[in-house]
Image (spheres, rainbow, N blue to C red):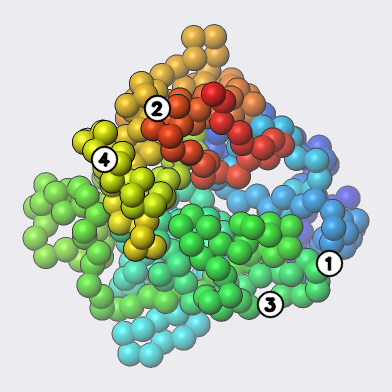
Amino acid sequence: MSTLLPSSCRGLVDADLRRRNTFGVAARAPLLIEVDDARQLGAAIADSGVESHDPLLVLGSGSNLLFAASPVGTVLSLCGQQVSISRESGDAVIVRADAGVEWHGFVMQTLAQGLAGLENLALIPGTVGAAPIQNIGAYGVEVRERIHAVEVFDRVSGQLQRMHHGDCAFAYRDSIFKHHPDRWIVTAVEFNLARASTPVLDYAGLRDELLAMGVVDASPRHVADAVIRIRRCKLPDPAVIGNAGSFFKNPIVPQPVADALSALHPGLPVFPAANGDSRKLSAAWMIDACGWKGYRDPDGDTGVSPSHALVLVNHGHATGMQLLDLARRIAGSVHGRFGVELEPEPRIIGADFVARA
């Protein structure tokens, strides 16, 4: 197959995906295509025999998905590594990065160049191409606030195109790309960054960590260092134990529901939501209150991290379906106690997510 693909592409039949997902679960792809140059993407897809209506899974670092089963169609990996400044005006700088660039490395590269804006998003696993799909966010910042445009390959037209921020339908952990994964393939992202900015420090724990570091006047690099320290304390390293970071979204509910739950459960953390009539609840607090934090299945390798209730872990040989079953049980117990539905953050391949009562 590889001899039929363009020179910047590679094909592998019956590809092992265990090391291509951070949960470390077993899965195989009938065909895996690696593409270095997005300009060759259309030819690579066509030469592999994949039609516009055929299933095609775009796989970055595999840090935001769970293989409940092996994918039924072709898997695509974008490997481009180009990063460049595409426009600069005063303190405002637009930086373009290929989809295959590792996210944390990109964040640190921009900081090394004196560019601010992504420091609160340091140490998030994944690639640049995955960032707008999930609208990744952490410590008071969502990536949509820094995105200028997203370059995509449209499988319907077979053409590369550029989608401006307003075309991407960004929302909490959501975007148009997440709702239409079989149409648009993110090939590169343009970011609005700055050489001078006011740091975002209002997220709980961030100022305290900076003070613990002895930092009073925080620079963007100080903020990134604080975020890295906090994340390393709270979140297990996928290189050490399989996980996909936070498995559940923080649920957003109408304000009257949040008020009623706060009255019943005074310790429940409640945060403002983008919609002023809604509130965001702490999924981690509710999961912990249901007794799941640190849990490990007695007959398997699935469990919940003892350091963070949102993180499901693979202790060694768990299958994707076993992890999904655990996630369903957790969501079912939270719904039973609080009447709140939890939704998964990772994309689940090969099954639907339905909470177990």
Q: CA distance from mark 1 to mark 4?
A: 55 Å
- Find disc 3 in the rendering and name its residue: 161
- Do the residues bearing badges 3 and 4 touch, measured as CB atoms within 8 Å? no
Residue 141: x %, y % from top left: 35, 61
Q: What's the mark number on residue 43?
A: 1
Q: Secondary structure at mark 1?
A: helix
Amino acid type shown at disc 2: Arg
Q: Earlier in the sequence, mark 4 or mark 2?
A: 4
Going from N to C along the chain, the mark reached first, 3 or 4, is 3
Is residue 156 found left or right of 301 in the rendered image? Answer: right
277, above or below 248, in the image = below
For residue 73, say whether it is visible.
yes
- In the image, taking residue 218 as reference, residue 48 lies left or right, namely right
- On the question of residue 141 being in view, the answer is no
At mark 4, the secondary structure is helix
Q: CA distance from mark 2 to mark 3?
A: 47 Å
Distance from disc 2 to disc 1, alpha carbons, whole Å, reads: 52 Å
Q: Tag 3 or tag 1, which sits nearer the N-term?
A: 1
Which residue is at 48% across, 39% downward? 342
Counting residues from the start of the chain, the first of labels 2 and 1 encountered is: 1
Which label sits in the foreground, 3 or 4?
Answer: 4
- Locate residue 321, reporting x and y percent: 64, 26
Up the image or down, 298 lies above or below 141; here it is above
Quickly name the residue at label 4: 262
Task: Look at mark 2 in the image and give the residue it sits on.
Answer: 337
Mark 1 to mark 3: distance in Å? 16 Å
Q: Is residue 250 left or right of residue 328?
A: left
4 in relation to 167, above or below: above
Mark 1 or mark 4: whose residue is earlier in sequence: 1
SS state under label 3: strand
Amino acid bearing label 1:
Ala
